[in-house]
Amino acid sequence: MARPAAVSAETIRTTVLAMLAEAGDPSPASGARFRQAVSVRKLRARLGAGDPALLSRHLNAIEAECVQAGLVNVAMPDLPPGIAEQMRALWRAAVAVQLDEVAQLRREALGQAETAEAATRDARLRVDLLRAEMVALREQISARDTELATARAELRTALSQTATVKTALDDARAQLAALTTELASRQRAQAEALAAVHARYEGLSRQLLQETAHQRDAWRSERERLGTVITEAQERTRALEGLREQLLADLAREREARQQAAAEAAALAAVVAEQRLTLTGLQDRQDGILRRATPAGAVRRPVRGTRGGLTPADTESAAGTPTDTPPAAARTAARTAARKTVRRRRS
């Protein structure tokens, strides 16, 4: 429904003056008579609209103007009756004019009422449309109510979980406070320990610097001593190197002499073996000659030495017997072979 139009201050003033004129008092009205003739309820009923608070404020202002300021209760001492009657006539004329204006305002108010009725019909149509929309909205609201019920159930579950989490959080906070206290005590103990360690470190540092200085001096003297020892050791090493070179040269000479002796011994061994072979062949020939020269059964074997050698007679007889290979040539050949062997070994 459309809201009634606001009533202007001039309209309110005109209506109040008309109501005072309609009261028809022979003398100017007092404050009590003003309130009896004009009230907020009568004024609102006369206008047909208006905010009571606004009407009350305007009515108080008009009352102050008419009653207290002297527009109604104006004291006119020594005023002639004719002039007073003319003034009352003038007042009644002004009130009549105001009543005409009130009538005109009433007609305008009726027109506005008809306009308001049309607006009301339009508003009713809009209300019907809004009702249809409200039905759809109610369906949506019912669906949302279902969702809200589900959300409330979830909320209750979440609240219970939140309470559990809050309890756990309180426990964790208590543990955190205990741990914070313990950490603070440990930090204080650590700070005290660090201070003690720092003081001890400073003492040990000074002691270490002193010991380092003593050790540096000792190492310097030891280094000088070791330098002298190293110099002496180098001299001894050079002497030993010279002795070693001399011994190696002597050893090489001894090795060559030993190799030469071994070669000569091998050559002599070869010569002796060849001589033995020669002697064996001579004995075999001698035995053959004796067997041919001696009758059967009278062959006399030569007496051999204890080590396979010959008697002096056999040696003399064998010396006169020619051999295939002379012993001097065999010895020469054996010596040549021994010298070649020694040369190969040296090379």
Image: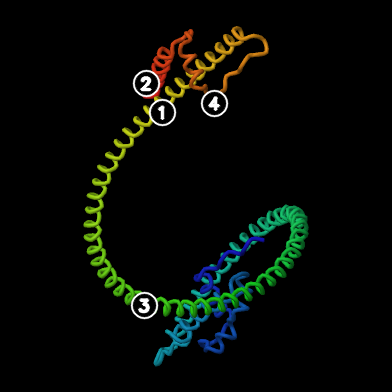
Q: Position of residue 319 (x, y in %)?
A: 46, 14
Foreground residue among 88 and 173 = 173
Disc 2 element:
helix
Precedes in sequence: disc 4 or disc 1? 1
Q: How many marks?
A: 4
User: What is the distance, in whole Å, between disc 3 and disc 2 at their CAs?
Assistant: 83 Å
Would you identify the image quadrant in which residue 298 lies? top right
Would you identify the image quadrant in which residue 283 lies? top right
User: What is the distance, in whole Å, between disc 4 and disc 1 at their CAs?
Assistant: 30 Å
User: What is the distance, in whole Å, between disc 2 and disc 1 at their CAs?
Assistant: 12 Å
Give the mark toward the camera: 3 or 2. Answer: 2
Amino acid at dot 3: Arg
Amino acid at dot 1: Ala
Numbered tag placed on residue 305 in the rendering = 4
Disc 3 element:
helix
Q: In the image, what residue occupies the spot 41% across and 16% down?
A: 331
Precedes in sequence: disc 4 or disc 2? 4
Give the mark toward the camera: 4 or 1. Answer: 4
Q: Position of residue 306 (x, y in %)?
A: 55, 28
Foreground residue among 247 and 32 = 247
Q: Are marks 4 and 2 in contact (CB under 8 Å)?
A: no
Q: Position of residue 212 (x, y in %)?
A: 28, 68
User: What is the distance, in whole Å, between disc 1 and disc 3 at their CAs?
Assistant: 81 Å
Q: Is residue 195 left or right of residue 308?
A: left
Q: In the image, what residue occupies the spot 49% across and 74% down?
A: 94
Give the mark toward the camera: 2 or 1. Answer: 1
Numbered tag placed on residue 343 in the rendering = 2
Precedes in sequence: disc 3 or disc 2? 3
Q: Which residue is mark 1?
A: 262
